[in-house]
Amino acid sequence: MTMILKRIMHIEDDPSIQEVARVALEVVGGFEVRSCDSGADGLAAADDFSPQLVLLDVMMPGMDGPQTLIELRKLPCMQGVPIVFMTAKAQTQEVAAYRDLGAAGVIIKPFDPMTLSDQIREIWEYKHA
Amino acid sequence: MHESEQLVAQLAALEERFRQRLHDELDELNHLADHLHRTPGALQDLRDRLHKLAGSAGTFGYAVLGERCRELEQRAQAELDAPHRSSAVLNSLAEATHHLNQLLEHTPDARTEHQRLDTPTTDEGDQRHIGLLVADDQMREQLERTLGSFGYQTSCFDNPTTLHQADHIDAMIVDTSPPGSTLLQDPVFRQRDAQSPPLLVISSQDNFTGRLHAVRVGAIGFFTKPVDLPMLESRLERCFNTLQGGPFRVLIIDDDTELSARYALVLSSAGMMVDTLSDPQQLLDKMTAFSPEVVLMDLSMPQYSGPELAQVIRLNDDWLRVPIVYLSAEVNAERQMSALLKAGDDFITKPISDSALLTTVYARAQRARMVSEALARDSLTGLLKHADIKEQVEIEAERALRTRSPLTVAMIDIDRFKSVNDRYGHASGDSVIRALSNLLRQRLRKIDRLGRYGGEEFVAVLPGCSEDDAFSILDSIRQAFSAVQFSSTQGKPFNCTFSAGISSCMAPGWNNSALLEDADRALYQAKESGRDRVCKAGVSSN
């Protein structure tokens, strides 16, 4: 039986995207969302929030998405937690490269706020099918 | 319902905040663009900010701006990757960045599509931009005039490099004459890839080598002089339609749900719309509801074989053109062939890499869509036929009555068409008909209905459009059409005109039963008073 997805951590440095994703995930999906401004913020909040899924921007100043993924994976609380990349880059090779890094899925920007939650649920259900 | 209203309200508030922030963001981009030459790190900052905007603008409805930012981001990245900075590239990047502000005014917002539809003119934001690399002055002028008439914007270039560096070109037309030209062997043509804008090649010689060179640089059209310009325009339109027709729909039938979910993820990551089916009993319902353009099917499932299911699909005439691709670990050629003989079109052998899966499905889907479009339309014009357009007039008249909104019907007839056929041949006549239908389609709105009523007679149904508005649109189309230069099969240039009659009904107390007849009478009046004009029937009020 699939575990119900409730807590999503969103790591994104662009406040506009952060806000719209939060509204979309909270209102449409009914998820509990923790928004983090940077990879370092995400790492610091992971233990306390204990996300079931992480939505991670690829290109961020300082620690970028792939680096953040590697660091998150080292935390005991993050073992087995699916990490989904969110990126404006959507070339086939890049999607394949993100998967090789262990990403559970890739969501392409611009995204539709109305269907973002469905996309996340689809990835979650696939991961737990 | 409540949630969705709440979401719409919150999104609207966020969009407003984004819009306000956007002005500051564009100011910052302009500032960086001005300092590209002087400030170290400015190019990288510019790239980062463009990347951010590429991701966010589209989410807030500024799709065109988002796309443009993405293109500029890629150009900035290419320059960052280059061993030396090129002053010309930096200048062009700075200039293109300064132009981003203009997109704020012209950007069509997806959430206000219904408002755009009410405006009875073509939106400037929809205009396609065609880059011309044509040395022959006469040819270039003809192209500019004809493509302009069809609503395309054109820009001229004098070498392959500037053409490929140009900002936001949707398609390019390259003239390779005189004979022996090595233009297509220029390295920039050889570096073209799937992301490059579609290329049409014009040549003075119709030979195998010329066509081969064109194919090698990825051209999608090859035209020999004298160029049939309406035919060239048709090709452009077809290529944009294929690009525009929404995501490809792919159905995966496999009892291994984990594997089909994996394929589905790969295909949907590339923008395709994917549905999966694990219980073949639901096959017919799924085919009807989802209407896939490609079916991927496991060759052997517990109770049914792939070929059996493929044959079930093929029993329905509507699905004959849907390609069926088997997914299988089967490498035995004989067994593969036996499956293909029963039904099915291709094999993908598992395991398959993500990119190979994508390429196979993409190629099949693209081809299927082209075939499907060709079959669904009237072979010459792609418009509705007589009975269908008459039905549309009735449907729209009823709707107009219900909604108390105006409706205009136009009847359009090509002037002296018989003499075109007699003097220049039927192939030229067909080309005139095709050109007018393309022009009408380009210039009218998506909600308008268009049909070929008879040989050279067309009907346009314009909901929500008053007689005066319809008059000005049709009159501008009339002028554009008369500027289109045709050429006979012998290369002789000629022009054509049309006459049109329009009839509207306005609430209240109107009469919508005689719209077509009234339009026909007005058309007769236009013919009688000298042709090449649009006449109004006058508002029917009882």
Image (tube, grey):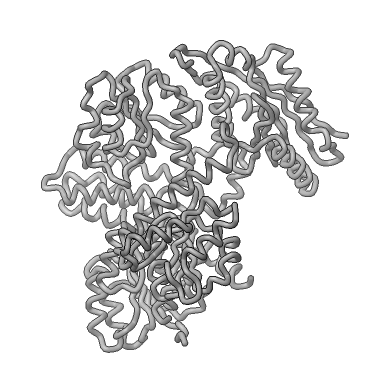
Give the tally of numbered discs.
0
Q: Quadrant location of the C terminus of chain B?
A: top right
The image quadrant of residue B419 is top right
Considering depth in this image, is B124 or B105 the residue closer to the camera?
Answer: B124
In this picture, residue B539 sits left or right of residue B338: right
The reply to whether residue A110 is visible in this rendering is: no
- Left or right position of B448 against B91: right
Q: Position of residue A45 (x, y in %)?
A: 32, 83
Q: Nearer the viewer, residue B333 or B183?
A: B333
Q: Is residue B365 above or below residue B94?
A: below
The x, y position of residue B100, in whole percent, is 37, 45
**In the foreground, B293 or B535:** B293
Rendered image quadrant of residue A58? bottom left
Q: Is residue B54 left or right of residue B308?
A: left
The residue positioned 50% from the left and 70% from the top of the image is B277
Q: Quadrant of the N terminus of chain B?
A: bottom right
Instruction: Establish if B372 lies above or below B214.
Output: below
Relative depth, front residue between B218 and B392: B218
> Percent x, y for residue B302?
46, 76
Q: Where in the figure is residue B292, as x and y percent of width and height? A: 52, 58
* Residue located 43% across and 54% down the image: B345
Residue pushed farthest left? B83
Q: Is residue B204 visible?
A: yes
Residue drawn at the location 53% of the way across and 39% of the way down: B123
